[in-house]
Image (tube, helix red, strand yellow):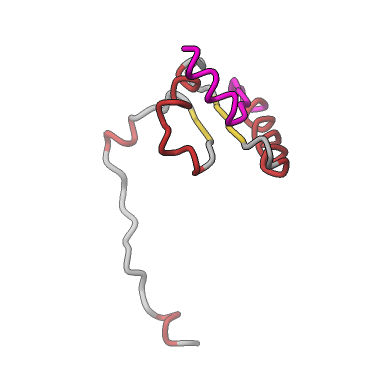
Amino acid sequence: MRQHDKQSYRYRLTNPPKALLKARLDNIALVPASILGLKALWQTAANTLPQGGVLLCHSQQNTRQRKLLERVGETFRQHGHVVMHLSMGEVYTKSRNC
């Protein structure tokens, strides 16, 4: 065995605080990192969804990303979530109309 295999981890996993255990998420938003700074734009679209809804935002040019998010959206639908797919261009236009 190597030396580092015997060493313990630096981080210790503990029980989370009670407030965190009681917290309930309203909606889930999966957006590209390039629009994280524009949270107000996509958050308005996410807030229109019912509780437990999922917003999936993708780039129009990246078809691989879109196909992957379609599969993720189908999985959420199978688990009973309302899913909204938006391209980044649609996020910009919907936020301006609101």
Q: Is residue 34 above or below residue 38?
A: below
From the viewer's perspective, tell me whether residue 96 is left or right of residue 74. Answer: left
Residue 91: x %, y % from top left: 54, 25
Q: Residue at x 55, y 26 (%)?
A: 54
- In terms of depth relative to the viewer, which is nearer, 23 or 72? 72
Q: Nearer the viewer, residue 75 or 6?
A: 75
Q: Is residue 23 magenta?
A: no
Which is more toward the observer, 38 or 17? 38
Closer to the camera in the image, 68 or 93: 93
Label tally = 0
Q: Position of residue 30 (x, y in %)?
A: 53, 35
Question: Does residue 25 appear to the left or right of 17 in the view shown?
Answer: right
Q: Quadrant of residue 40?
A: top left
* Range drawn in magenta: 78-98
Quarter of the image where one finds residue 60:
top right
- Residue at the image point whose x is 55% and y is 27% from the top: 55
Q: Residue at x 72, y 44 (%)?
A: 64
Q: Position of residue 2 (x, y in %)?
A: 47, 87
Residue displayed at 50% across by 42% down: 34
The residue most toward the top is 98
Q: With respect to residue 67, does 5 lie above or below? A: below
